[in-house]
Each structure stands twice: as C-alpha cells, then as structure tokens.
Amino acid sequence: MKNNGSSHQSSKEKKLKRKEVLEKKKTIDEIIKAASAVKDHLASFPPFCQYDRNGLSVYLVTGAGEQLSSPMKKYIQNLLKANMEAPYGSEWPLEEKVKRREMVASEARYIFLRETPKSAHNESPLKANNDKMGDDGDRVVGFVHYRFIVEEDIPVIYVYELQLESCVQGKGLGKFLMQLIELIARKNRMGAVMLTVQKANVLAMSFYTSKLRYAVSTISPSRVDPLIGAEKSYEILCKTFDSEARAKLEEDENARNE
C-alpha cells in the first residue's frame, strides 16, 4: 500500500509539474504576442525619437518586415553588404541569402534612422537606392532589426542587425540605439536583450562587451562546448534583466544547476 501511495503521489506531482510548465509556456507566449502586437514601440519613449548630438541630427521611425518597400529592401541589402562582407569573409554569400529572408519575415521589427532635413550631409554612396522610402523621403542612414523571441524559456528581444552608415558611426548613435532597445525590452516584459557578433568584427565585440557590458551567453557555442566554439565564427551575447534570465542565459553551468 505504501508503494501505491508514493506512486500516486509521484503521478500527482508530475501532473502538477506539467500544468505548471504549460501555464508558464502560455504566459511566455502571451508576453511575446503582446509585445509583437505593439504597432510603434517608439511611442512610449518620446525622448528617443530624435538624436541631436555630435554634429548629427537624425529622427527615428518604426517599420515591419512585411511592409518594407522595394527601395528600402535594396537599401538594407546594400548597407549589410558594405558593413558585413568583410567580417563574414568567405561565409558572406551564404549569409547574405539568409539575411535577405530574415529581413522580410513577419516577426521582423525595425527602427530606421532618417536625417533631419536641415542637417543634410554629403550625398551617401547608397543614396541611389535611398529615394521614395515612404513619408517625406529623408535619407536613411541606418537601422535596427529586432524580434521578440523565446530563448531557454525566457522571452527576449533578439537584435538581428544594428547597421549604421560610415558617415554616422563613432557619434554615440549605436549606444543610444541599444539603450532604446533595452528600454523597449523592459517595457514589454522581456528578460534579456541578445545578439550575435562575428568574432572577426573586433570593434563590434569590444563595443558590446566593454562599452555596453554585454556578456557571452551560456547558449553561445564557446560556452556550450569550447571545442565547437573554437570552430564557430561568432559569439552570442546577452544582457539580462532578472534573476531567472541571468541563471539561464548568463551564469555558468554550476550556477544553472544549483
């Protein structure tokens, strides 16, 4: 009888556990759905809709993967090629195809940077593909592509791209944009911000790890298995906002198993 009792108890515990897991999954799905349904994530942060610093004046507008115009798609492709072909090296032709698919996905959310008219700089080499891009057609000088996804049972913002034209780099814009992404993440109940960086992109790696204090995530190849990690050309970085996200995405294996 004793055994039956303990087996009944164990079965009950399993049912409770399963219910708990399903409820948690449902909650996470709802968080992601709610965040993805927001039409304009900039609306909650008026101070971040304009950037006037270091001789630069740009304004921010939002967009979605499914709604990109043909000129905008061309612009994104050109800027990606200009900035990423060197870090990816021989992997670029394959990676470029992947990025083209990612670019127009229904989950893709964008923040575009447009020059404020009064501050028109010299014409960009990308200007040819930069006309008639909605509203008043002010020149686009960069963009962020991000998504709301689940990693290790944690809802996160994953930054797929942060790309700036060379004429606006080194003016604090990258840091400003990442601060905005972190605010959007917190506002929408995300546990972390995550992104992938090519090891060859030394400046980007230093920017995220030193300047912005991002950590190499536990799901990055080098931390999953150093041997596999050595063969991979990238690291996955994260900045976590709560203890559960930290334990699953940032702490070492021992901390996760405790």
Image (cartoon, helix red, strand yellow):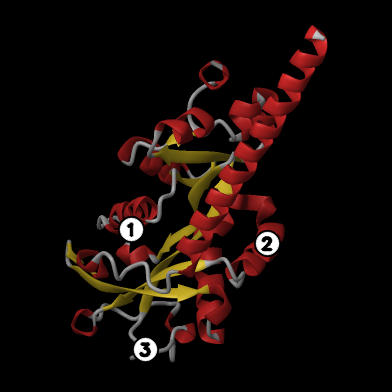
- The residue labelled by disc 1 is 177
| Rendering quarter of residue 183 | bottom left
Residue 186 image point, x, y percent = 35, 50
Displayed quadrant of residue 92: bottom right
Front residue of 219/14: it is: 14
Secondary structure of the residue carrying numbered label 3: loop
| Residue 190: percent from left, percent from top | 44, 49
Q: Position of residue 42 (x, y in %)?
A: 32, 68
Write down the residue under mark 2. 98
Which of pointers 1 and 3 lies earlier in the amino acid sequence?
Answer: 3
- Using the image, determine if residue 83 lies above or below residue 191: below
Type of amino acid at the residue the image marks with label 3: Gly
Q: Is residue 14 left or right of residue 58?
A: right
Structural crowding at the residue carrying mark 3, measured as other residues with C-alpha within 10 Å and reported as few (<14), some (14–19) or many (≥20):
few
Circles 2 and 1 in contact, beta carbons < 8 Å: no
Q: Is residue 87 visible?
A: no
Q: Is residue 209 left or right of residue 14?
A: left
Q: Amino acid at mark 2?
A: Val
| Residue 40 vertical position relative to residue 191 in the rendered view, above or below | below
- Say if mark 3 contacts mark 2, CB within 8 Å: no
Assign a secondary structure to mark 1: helix
Q: CA distance from mark 3 to mark 2?
A: 28 Å
From the image, tell me which residue sits under label 3.
137
In this rendering, would 83 be left or right of 4?
left
* Image quadrant assignment for residue 122: bottom left
Q: Nearer the viewer, residue 29 or 60?
A: 29
